[in-house]
Amino acid sequence: DAKTTQPNSMESNEEEPVHLPCNHSTISGTDYIHWYRQLPSQGPEYVIHGLTSNVNNRMASLAIAEDRKSSTLILHRATLRDAAVYYCILNPLNTGNQFYFGTGTSLTVIP
Amino acid sequence: NAGVTQTPKFQVLKTGQSMTLQCAQDMNHNSMYWYRQDPGMGLRLIYYSASEGTTDKGEVPNGYNVSRLNKREFSLRLESAAPSQTSVYFCATRSTDTQYFGPGTRLTVL
């Protein structure tokens, strides 16, 4: 099972950018990198995903290292509603049937 | 358009009792999933169904059975509940590359 390593917790000031790191040194060439987040007492929600190139959407940006052994989720301006647990997940072949969530990074946003 | 719905929201069982957790989706997705989340942990896959009529084991299937009743509904059954099955259970569906999760069922087994 492809594994990811994330810091247990991070803090950010409101309206500041946040960079959430993820290490995945055993990633294979067909593993897609997915990010989900889980707000308190809710199910996870999709944030962003990519394979090799950096990706942007309305929620965040995903920066993938050239060797693909690490990636960074970037929230451009943190808001209080961004306080959640963020999961970095490797999904082989983007099949969706092998989603290993790990323990994630708990993000606290300070007003 | 409700997305993914789960019933019940909360349930307390005694050891040895049985129950079925219900999940329904109105997103017309083929793939559906059941996960459990223990305190302070990430989600672990119990079972999944790639399409109507098919089911497969995930990472932690022991003690559970599933039924894919039709395209909309995917149920999870605990035949003889144990305290180790105390957890929050999430159902999910999948489009091309995104999973959509329900609000969860919080189950306590005494």
Image (cartoon, coloured by chain):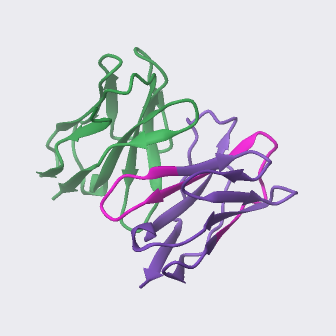
- The reply, left or right, for residue B26 in relation to residue A34 is left
Confirm whether the magenta stretch covers residue A77: no
Instruction: Report x, y in % for residue A56.
Output: 66, 52
Instruction: State which quadrant residue A5 falls in.
Output: bottom right
Q: Which residue appears at 57% of the width and 30% of the height?
A: B96
Percent position of residue B47, x then y: 43, 35
A16 vs B37: above or below: below
Chain drawn green, letter? B
Q: Quadrant of the N terminus of chain B?
A: top left
Q: Chain A is drawn in which colour?
A: purple
Front-most of residues A105 and A3: A105
Judging depth in this view, the residue of A102 and B95 nearest the camera is B95
Image-quadrant location for residue B69: top left
Judge whether residue A35 is colored magenta: yes
Asked if residue A33 shows in the view, the reply is: no
Residue B101 image position (x, y, % from top left): 39, 43
